[in-house]
């Protein structure tokens, strides 16, 4: 009986379900340097085992407009969000000069219609190292189809290029996922009880 109670308690605990990771359906960028591609932010290029490489062919970078850069990610449908996962610009052409092009300070805004955005969070990204890096994760809360990422500056590049490696969104599991998980715990509890 105690084991069944424990199984049911675990099934009812929200912490057991990790956010589902969403690969955005599309991305729009304020500008893109001619040798880079904004699609690299969502296509998984450069990702292996959760780490992002330092190959410039797998990153995105702005033009040198001097204006703050922005990106809008379309998730394909309205989704309840849990976090944003950002892999910083991690390209090192030698002597570390290009790593300062990585985005530093940013804000995130959310929208259900792609027109009206509400502030959601802000943060500061660590500078890349040139070695494979994990995502930097920032909590989000709210429903959105569109996620806007405003990149306010970089780590000190004199030409004001600003870049990133990849972006993914964490979503709160849907009700069907919770129901299946609870049923699974119930079956485990039943099996454990029958074993006695």
Image (spheres, rainbow, N blue to C red):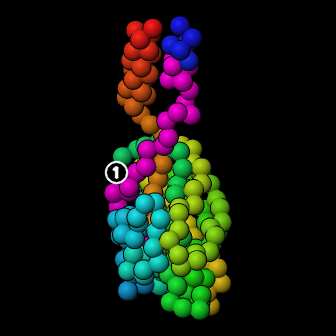
Magenta part of the protein: which range? Answer: 7-29
Please report the residue visible at 54 percent of the width from the left and 24 percent of the height from the top: 10
Residue 111 visible in this rendered orientation of the protein: no
Whether 80 is drawn above or below 30: the answer is: above
> For numbered disc 1, what is the local secondary structure?
strand
Question: Percent x, y for residue 54?
Answer: 47, 78
Please report the residue visible at 50 percent of the width from the left and 23 percent of the height from the top: 11
Total numbered labels placed on residues in the image: 1
Question: Percent x, y for residue 86?
Answer: 52, 62
Residue 167 visible in this rendered orientation of the protein: yes
To which quarter of the image does residue 60 belong? bottom left
Asked whether 28 falls inside the magenta stretch, the response is yes
* View extreme (front): residue: 196
What residue sits right under mark 1 in the picture? 76
Asked whether 69 falls inside the magenta stretch, the response is no
To which quarter of the image does residue 126 belong? bottom right
65 lies left or right of 127: left
Mark 1 burial class by Cα count in 10 Å: few <14, some 14-19, many 20+? some
Q: Quadrant of the C terminus?
A: top left
Question: Percent x, y for residue 188?
Answer: 42, 19
Question: Percent x, y for residue 160?
Answer: 58, 85
Please report the residue visible at 42 percent of the width from the left and 80 percent of the height from the top: 55
Please report the residue visible at 49 percent of the width from the left and 35 percent of the height from the top: 17
Q: Nearer the viewer, residue 151 or 36?
A: 36
Whether 49 is drawn above or below 19: the answer is: below
Whether 86 is drawn above or below 13: the answer is: below
């Amino acid at each position: 009986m105690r084991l069944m109670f424990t199984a049911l308690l675990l099934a009812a605990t929200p912490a057991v379900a990790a956010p589902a990771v969403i690969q955005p359906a599309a991305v729009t960028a304020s500008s893109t340097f001619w040798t880079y591609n904004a699609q690299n932010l969502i296509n998984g290029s450069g990702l292996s085992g959760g780490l992002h490489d330092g190959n410039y062919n797998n990153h995105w970078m702005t033009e040198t407009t001097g204006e703050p850069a922005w990106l809008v990610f379309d998730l394909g449908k309205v989704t309840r969000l849990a976090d944003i996962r950002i892999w910083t610009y991690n390209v090192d052409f030698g002597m570390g000069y290009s790593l300062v092009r990585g985005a530093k300070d940013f804000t995130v805004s959310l929208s259900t219609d792609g027109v009206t955005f509400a502030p959601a969070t802000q943060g500061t990204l660590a500078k890349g190292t040139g070695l494979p890096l994990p995502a930097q994760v920032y909590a989000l809360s709210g429903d959105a189809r569109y996620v806007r990422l405003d990149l306010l500056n970089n780590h000190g590049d004199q030409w004001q290029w600003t870049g990133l490696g990849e972006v993914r969104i964490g979503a709160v599991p849907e009700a069907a996922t919770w129901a299946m998980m609870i049923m699974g715990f119930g079956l485990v509890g039943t099996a454990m009880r029958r074993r006695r």
